[in-house]
Image (cartoon, rainbow, N blue to C red):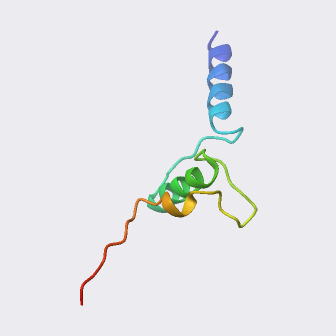
Amino acid sequence: MFGISGTLLNISTRAQNLGKPIRHNIDNWDEMMMRRDEQLTGHKRGQRDDPAPPPGFETSSIWYTQKTTM
């Protein structure tokens, strides 16, 4: 019973992570890269190998510019 539930939990976790194992010891850099990957692919574990961003990527940043008066 414990073996079956552990196996099902492992399968469920890997299915949610696109077949990759879970991440441990995530720091600020990893979180930033996961947010970037989610903006590029729609999933925080997805990655792309082509350099062209999808349409709308340039406006999906959380950082906004402001006009400065000089």
Q: In which quarter of the image is the N terminus?
A: top right
Give the residue displayed 60% in from the left and 44% down from the top. Answer: 43
Residue 68 vs residue 17: left or right? left
Q: Position of residue 37 (x, y in %)?
A: 59, 54
Q: Residue 63, located in which quarter of the rendered image?
A: bottom left
Above or below residue 22? Residue 51 is below
Residue furthest out toward the bottom: 70
Above or below residue 20? Residue 63 is below
Q: Position of residue 11 (x, y in %)?
A: 68, 26
Give the residue displayed 54% in from the left and 53% down from the top. Answer: 34
Q: In which quarter of the image is the C terminus?
A: bottom left
Nearer-the-camera pick, 45 or 68: 68
Residue 30 vs residue 12: left or right? left
Q: Where is residue 69 in the image (x, y as percent from the top left)?
A: 24, 85
Q: Where is residue 24 in the image (x, y as percent from the top left)?
A: 54, 47
Q: How many marks?
A: 0
Residue furthest out toward the right: 50
Residue furthest out toward the top: 1
Give the residue displayed 65% in from the left and 28% down from the top. Answer: 10
Q: Residue 16, located in which quarter of the rendered image?
A: top right
Give the residue displayed 49% in from the left and 60% down from the top. Answer: 59
Nearer-the-camera pick, 20 or 37: 37
